[in-house]
Image (cartoon, rainbow, N blue to C red):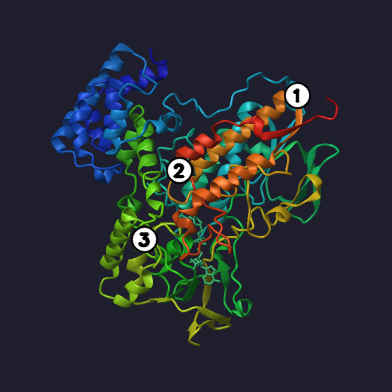
């Protein structure tokens, strides 16, 4: 039997067959096919539909209308059978036909190594298989004597808090802002949004069927994080408008001592058994060192600190930087400004995705909300379309002749498509094509989504300046050819302090060394991106070498890290040890593995600078791994890699 709820819902769903069939018209073929085969078990549908699904995105579907209509009838039949018989909906993946199902769903072979990951991502039973369970439930007094300090209440800090709360671990989250959301709270620039499809860029344990866009805007993502905080009553654990200034590991008490600054500037101290940094990599704005910048007479602000009191309408706006932030700001304001001068140090590649501009219609939302498991398969389809499939093409082919511009045949093919796209958008202007086309291989910097950036460059009120900036004067920006570009407002779309990770927190570990002593100004390193020798009971979410640069979702990665950290905390609490610390051998072995993997990958390419690598050319921010690799690396916390310190009274 299904639960009463499920059965009632199903009966309701099938009570008006015509309405059901009408509603199903909004469904995408691939996820609906998965629902049909999963619930009905008739694999002949795979043979009939698969040849028409040419790839993993919905726009790769070429299934004839008549066949789609037949499939909708079959889905209605199956749902009626479940409703009439009260049979339980199967919450296991059908392993016997899974490979064929996934191939039909994506138009590609999905290797078996992905099945455990897919099982967790799809989570048909809705129980979050990544949840870390106690092996021996600790006594209440043991749990009461252990507390964790989390720094930051963005996607990561909230995700960590939800899992600790479920496990009954005590914790406090310190958040410097007035509310949750992190990046999505702070970045409010015009056009703010995400370029990872949201039905996948969201917690696996809280599918949201109500996104208004496939690529949501910032306010909806912030609202989603808030919704998770309210849904789980997490707010009571968060102290807002307070900032962690320093953390010091006290070797006598084997505890972390944190100094925290309140909004009014006063400070106080708290202690914690363990600390989780959830401050991310893209938090502290990087203000460029440009001569005379402070002399500019108008408003000048960073994209992450957008000054909404500065009305840009009808003004001459100068924008420095053409990364993901700049690329969103430009098209969002171009129509309203009198002139937009864009100062580009180097162009980015930007790919078109037809879904980027689409809204999720109410009928699509209906399908996501009402057809059993449809939303799960839809999420999987997005995972597959935007994650690992291109990773192997980011490796340099040693025999490839044109390494300056491309890496291998597949990379060259992508370059050809991207160039054709630029030409189709700005084709009449060879000089603009030259300026907008990178000379380095695709994916060398973050691959952006073309949100009408190229089209915007052709507008009469837009100037793309690719001369270097010499200095800034009160009236505007002066380039190396001594031209003054007059501006009323200056927007700094210049990125973040990704090299000085965790800065400006002062973090002092065992033996008195600070984390910046160990990392220097630009070489952060951590085991699996999470733990650091000499910093006991200290865990980092979205730390060194964990930025997904080929595809995927940062939320997927943070869930891998949360699972690993939860296992580390479990190890500590269950064993009664006071501290754990990564041993130098596995730490360095991992560093070598990361560096070796990066050696042939696009982010090490000599012809490109990016926030992924430091001035010595070492890639410190980007992960070299496929999602499946990182999931496997972090799936099991290995205590043998850690040094444990018993509690003083043990
Ligand atoms: O920052 P960036 P961002 N003089 O570092 C230029 C995420 N994100 O905020 O390329 C002149 O990418 C710099 O030039 P160059 C996403 O992960 C996601 O845009 O170094 N120019 C570059 O053009 C992203 O990758 C989303 O030659 C200077 C730009 O400033 C990450 O955040 C949206 C300069 C900085 O680009 C960072 O993106 C927004 C100087 N002195 C952000 N200094 C979405 O999901 C820097 N530049 C859509």
Tell me: residue 487, above or below residue 197.
Answer: below
Q: From the viewer's perspective, is 166 left or right of 648?
A: left
Query: Which quadrant: the C terminus?
Result: top right
Q: Tag on residue 626?
A: 2
Compared with residue 144, is residue 358 higher up or lower down, i.e. above or below? below
Tell me, yes or no, if residue 18 can be seen here: no
> 132 or 492, which lies in front?
132
- Of the image marks 2 and 3, the number of the one nearer the N terminus: 3
Residue where numbered disc 3 is placed? 406
Q: Quadrant of residue 47?
A: top left
> Quick one: which residue is furthest to the bottom in this view?
482
User: How packed is label 3: few (under 14 Cα within 10 Å), some, or many (20 or more)?
Assistant: many
The x and y percentages for residue 545 are 56, 49
The residue drawn where x is 47% and y is 64% is 608
Q: Position of residue 144 (x, y in %)?
A: 75, 27
Relative depth, front residue between 112 and 348: 112
Q: Which mark is residue 142?
A: 1
Q: Secondary structure at mark 2?
A: loop
């Amino acid at each position: 039997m299904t639960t009463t709820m499920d059965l009632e819902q199903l009966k309701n769903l099938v009570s008006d067959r015509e309405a059901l069939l009408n509603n199903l018209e909004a469904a995408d073929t691939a996820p609906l096919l998965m629902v049909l085969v999963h619930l009905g078990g008739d694999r002949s549908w795979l043979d009939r539909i698969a040849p028409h699904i040419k790839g993993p995105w919905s726009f790769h579907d070429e299934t004839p209308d008549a066949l789609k209509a037949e499939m909708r009838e079959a889905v209605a039949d199956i749902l009626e059978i479940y409703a009439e018989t009260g049979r339980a909906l199967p919450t296991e993946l059908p392993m016997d036909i899974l490979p064929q199902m996934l191939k039909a769903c994506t138009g590609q072979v999905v290797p078996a190594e992905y099945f455990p990951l897919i099982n967790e991502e799809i989570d048909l039973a809705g129980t979050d298989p990544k949840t870390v369970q106690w092996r021996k439930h600790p006594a209440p007094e043991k749990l009461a004597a252990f507390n964790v300090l989390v720094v930051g209440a963005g996607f990561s800090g909230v995700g960590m808090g939800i899992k600790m709360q479920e496990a009954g671990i005590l914790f406090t989250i310190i958040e410097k802002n007035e509310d949750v959301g992190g990046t999505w709270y702070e970045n409010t620039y015009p056009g703010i949004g995400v370029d990872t499809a949201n039905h996948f860029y969201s917690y696996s344990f809280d599918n949201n069927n109500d996104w208004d866009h496939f690529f949501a805007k910032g306010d909806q993502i912030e609202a989603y994080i808030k919704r998770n905080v309210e849904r789980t009553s997490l707010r009571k654990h968060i102290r807002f408008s307070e900032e962690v200034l320093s953390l010091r590991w006290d070797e006598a008490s084997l505890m972390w001592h944190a100094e925290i600054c309140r909004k009014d500037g006063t400070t106080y101290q708290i202690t914690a058994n363990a600390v989780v940094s959830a401050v991310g990599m893209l938090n502290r704005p990087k203000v460029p060192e440009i001569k005379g910048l402070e002399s500019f007479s108008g408003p000048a602000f960073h994209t992450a600190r957008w000054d909404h009191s500065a009305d840009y309408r009808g003004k001459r706006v100068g924008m420095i930087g053409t990364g993901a932030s700049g690329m969103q700001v430009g098209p969002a304001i171009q129509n309203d400004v009198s002139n937009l001068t864009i100062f580009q140090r180097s162009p980015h590649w930007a790919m078109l995705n037809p879904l980027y501009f689409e809204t999720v219609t109410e009928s699509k939302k209906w399908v996501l909300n009402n057809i059993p498991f449809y939303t799960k398969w839809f999420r999987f389809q997005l995972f597959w379309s935007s994650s690992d499939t291109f990773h192997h093409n980011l490796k340099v082919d040693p025999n490839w002749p044109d390494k300056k511009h491309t890496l291998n045949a597949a990379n060259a093919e992508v370059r050809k498509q991207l160039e054709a796209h630029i030409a189709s958008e700005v084709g009449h202007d060879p000089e603009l094509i030259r300026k907008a086309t990178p000379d380095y291989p695709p994916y060398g910097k973050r691959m952006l989504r073309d949100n009408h950036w190229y089209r915007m460059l052709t507008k009469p009120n837009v100037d793309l300046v690719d001369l270097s900036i010499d200095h800034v004067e009160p009236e505007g920006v002066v380039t190396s050819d001594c031209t003054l570009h007059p501006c009323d407002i200056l927007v700094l779309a210049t990125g973040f302090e990704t090299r000085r990770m965790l800065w400006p927190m002062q973090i002092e570990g065992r033996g008195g060394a600070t984390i910046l002593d160990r990392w220097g100004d630009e070489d952060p390193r951590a085991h699996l991106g999470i733990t650091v020798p000499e910093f006991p009971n200290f865990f980092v979410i979205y730390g060194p070498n964990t930025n997904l640069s080929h595809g995927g979702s940062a939320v997927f990665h943070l869930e891998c890290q949360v699972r690993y950290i939860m296992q580390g905390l479990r190890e500590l609490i269950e064993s009664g040890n006071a501290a754990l610390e990564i041993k130098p051998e596995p730490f360095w072995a991992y560093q070598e593995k990361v560096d070796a993997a990066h050696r042939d990958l696009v982010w090490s390419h000599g012809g490109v600078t990016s926030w992924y690598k430091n001035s010595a050319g070492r890639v410190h921010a980007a992960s070299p791994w496929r999602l499946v690799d990182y999931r496997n690396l972090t799936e099991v916390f290995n205590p043998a890699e850690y040094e444990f310190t018993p509690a003083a009274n043990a």
